[in-house]
Image (spheres, rainbow, N blue to C red):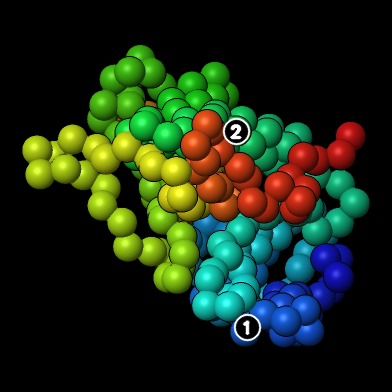
Amino acid sequence: MIRPGVYEYEIQAKMEHIFRREGAMGPAYPSIVATGENACVLHYIENNQVLKDGDLLLIDAGCAYDYYNADITRTWPVGNRISSEQRILYDLVLQAQLAAIEKVQPNLPFNAFHDAATRTIIVGLVDLGLLKGDVDTLIKEKKHKAFFMHGTGHFLGLDVHDAGLLRNPDKTWQPFAPGNVVTVEPGIYISPDYEPEEGQPQVDQRWRGIGIRIEDDVLVTETGHEVLTAAVPKVLNG
């Protein structure tokens, strides 16, 4: 269904129909179906715009099954082509996500996967000239928030943002434990009206209006992790 001329709500309706048809209780949360620059809005739920050739489509959705919730994001090209800028940013987000997933391990602190994603994204944005400065300084000053403004993930279970202790009383991070399930969802969002902070470079128009997120649900096991949503493709062809 992902083709020019289709409306976001048509994609949503078909997807949620499949949720119910396959035995789910329905959507776990309001489905995000965001084409083009709508993907730069983190919790976009209007879902009323038409898909256009050359844009990307970001879907953040999941179903509730037996009271447990899924939370998955994938980003697709709408037409038969993807621009070099879209592909570069997509590959960077995927690289960041894979680095973050490797840090979802028993006894590693909860912040380790966010730190891995953040560093990967900042290094990539510096290489592209979209950020300027020393990588460690940019991380310390949270300059990534201009393009990656949310956390890398959250606990998942009976609630979409499930309860869980992240920090100890001394403010140190809690480690992952076997049985934890978390989302891993880095993204890059370059608003069409982005204005850089002082000292940061202007962003060429060809990068603007691109929003990309890739999200999987990951179980912490006794010896590592299992990507529960691994059957949903995320590597671009070609």
Taking the view exactly as shown, the residue that stands out farthest to the left is: 170
Q: What residue sits 41% from the left and 53% below the top?
A: 154
Query: Looking at this view, is 153 or 168 the one in front?
Result: 168
- Residue at the spot of label 1: 26
Q: Residue at x 52, y 41 (%)?
A: 221
Residue at 24%, 37% in the rendered image: 173
- Judging depth in this view, the residue of 197 and 94 nearest the camera is 94
Quadrant of image for the C terminus: top right
- What is the spatial separation of the Cα atoms under label 1 and label 2, in whole angstroms? 29 Å
Q: Amino acid at mark 1?
A: Gly
Residue 11 is situated, as x and y percent measured from the top left of the image, at 75, 75
Q: Quadrant of the N terminus?
A: bottom right
Residues at marks 1 and 2 touching, judged by CB atoms closer than 8 Å: no
Q: Residues within 10 Å of mark 2 (few under 14, many from 20)?
A: some
* Residue 22 visible here: yes
Tell me if I can see residue 143 in this picture. Answer: no
**What amino acid is labelled 2 in the image?**
Leu
Secondary element type, mark 2: helix
Query: Hey, which quadrant is residue 112 in on the image?
Result: top left
- The residue sitting at the top extreme is 134
The residue tagged with tag 1: helix, strand or loop? Answer: strand
Q: Residue at x 26, y 52 (%)?
A: 165
Q: Residue 98, labelled with which disc? A: 2
Give how far across and how far down residue 211 sits, in percent: 59, 51
